[in-house]
Image (cartoon, rainbow, N blue to C red):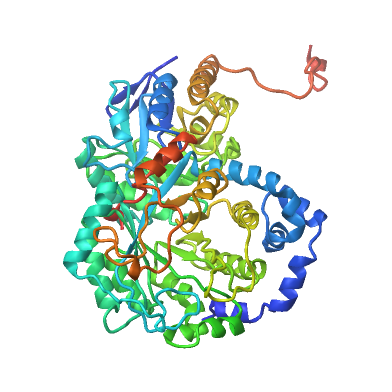
Amino acid sequence: METFKEIADNIDWKSTSNSIYSKTEVDVEKALNTAKPNLEDFKALISPAAEPYLEEMAQKSNALTLERFGNTIQMYAPLYLSNECQNICTYCGFSLDVKIERKTLTDEEILAEVKVLKSYGYDHVLIVTGEANKTVGVDYIKNAIQLMTPHFSHISIEVQPLEQNEYEELIAEGLNTVLVYQETYNRDNYKKHHPKGKKSNYDYRIETHDRLGKAGIHKMGVGVLIGLEDWRTDSFFAASHLSYLEKKYWKSNYAISFPRLRPCAGGVELKSVMTDKQLVQLICAYRIFNQEIELSMSTRESDTFRNNIIKLGITSISADSKTDPGGYANPNTNLEQFEIHDKRTTSQFIQTIKDQGYEPVFKGWDGALQ
Amino acid sequence: MSNLTIGNKVFTSRLFTGTGKFKSSIQMEEALLASGSELVTMALKRVDVQNEKDDILSHLYHSQFNLLPNTSGVRTAKEAVFAAELAREALETNFIKLEIHPDPKYLMPDAIETLKATEELVKKGFIVMPYIHADPVLCKRLEEVGTHAVMPLGSPIGSNKGIRTSDFLEIIIDQATVPVIVDAGIGAPSHAAYAMELGADAVLVNTAIAVADNPVQMAIAFKLAVEAGRIAYEAKLGSVSNEAKASSPLTSFLS
């Protein structure tokens, strides 16, 4: 059975890139005025030619989002369970070759975290781990889901890619959503940034969403780690991936995230640095391209950026996050994956959402419905 | 304007409303009160039925409102029946708006699962109001298994496109032995009035009120439009013709 791998292998990186960079004003205006934008229109919307149309794009994105999602923003919280990892990834704080303290939470520690998140009001939790199959394998994740189902109505995971039967097993326990980002769709560059560990297998990762679709997952997330490659070309591959999945696994929901690497001393060399303006352009382009998709934002971004992005197409957002395992109950920055940017408390942040005329929604799903 | 009866309840308002997409629960409450609506639907996935202080439910404790829990988010008849039982137990109503859309992108209702679930829920004593395509045969099949109303769509849900299915709605209304409530796609008061003029027994409106700049004023506009459309229907509209009909060229020889 065909998977997205075969399709991606047939999209030539260089000519795709050239095609994006040669889009003109005429293409952008067509994309903005068509009722059902296609992938060529998406190229125009993310192209340099669309930069002068940013306000127009933002207004269109705002209107489309309002029509579909109303004046609401879904709230979620990431919950890091382990920073153990057998992969070497050039950009990641949990990479095997990074000398940090390693920790995997026990049941008691997990429940202590749950207690803090519940006190903040969260009902949607995103479980995050590194890839360490001996200590944080499927059984560990299954146990964590079992611990959490009594407390949360929506459970997501962002962990290593799994087999179809393993996903089926976790779905039966109450798993709703799986986020797996390709990081970059450029095969050569992928190898460069993932030199060691199971994650270095590009093909296994790119076929993950097909396994998820067959397993009947409720929602899956697609995305790239912005900065590893030219963001426009990489985003086109992600959008193609999304279009393919939507048609094939039509019973699943989809979400897009926008993790953006920033240049930092001693950090990985970035192929492209995305500006705030360009990130707004990408978010609006996705919304114009796909009115129904969930667009999600983390606390990697700054206060000002997050305050303003609420009106521009984002429908799901986290706040007050910790990226160190155990960090909600016992913060320890020596354990964290990356330093978060927006450090406001949940109650401060939801007030900001309300001030802008939006309703923060904590419960958007019910575990009993699965 | 006559009253509308569904199951064991009599409604004086023929405008049914939804609770999604509002800026705040307070604004939702104000708008729904202003609409005069007596039947208000809410998604089970969105409310915490175990919590009396739930931000949506706590704003609906008015004698004006009857609650109509909906099964939005379920993908099969089995899931829908489970959700309906949960709602009945927690909210103490046997009304259920049956929404089964395995397609989360366009939220298109699944006719086959909906028919199965309706049959089962009717047997279990629910007042079933299924959301469906404007499919006249499906409506008759739902009647045969005991549905209490049918809720055909006017156009895709949330689209504000208005009544795009009028040819089929007219057939459904003509054949129906249960109330016909036009659900989904109604974006302006004129759309609601038009559906009522066609003979719909009620309409359900959510997005158009919730995302208006002024939801309270929009709710009032819909209230008036629904009343106007219904009164016009009961008063019997004149027939429409594009040409003047002054002479009788084919039969004038008879006079």
Report x, y in % for residue B96: 31, 39
| Residue at far bottom of view | A196
Residue at 37 percent across and 35 percent down: it is B41
Residue at 44 percent across and 42 percent down: it is B139
| Residue at far front of view | A265
Left or right, A80 with reference to B199: left
In the displayed structure, B144 sits above or below A236; it is above
In the displayed structure, A173 sits above or below B55; it is below
| Residue at far top of view | B255
Report x, y in % for residue B180: 44, 33
The answer to which of B110 and A177 lies nearer the viewer is A177
Report x, y in % for residue A83: 33, 74
Count of numbered circles on the image? 0
Regarding residue A128, the answer to whether it shows in the image is: no
Quadrant position of the C terminus of chain A in the picture: bottom left
Residue B161 appears in which quarter of the rendering?
top right
Left or right, A184 with reference to B124: right
The answer to which of A350 and B225 lies nearer the viewer is A350
The answer to which of A215 and B243 lies nearer the viewer is A215
Left or right, A255 with reference to B37: right
| Residue at far left of view | A108
Left or right, A364 with reference to B235: left
Residue at 22 percent across and 64 percent down: it is A110
Regarding residue B194, the answer to whether it shows in the image is: yes
Residue at 49 percent across and 48 percent down: it is A303
The answer to which of A248 and A10 lies nearer the viewer is A10
In the displayed structure, A367 sits above or below B122; it is below
Report x, y in % for residue B221: 53, 20
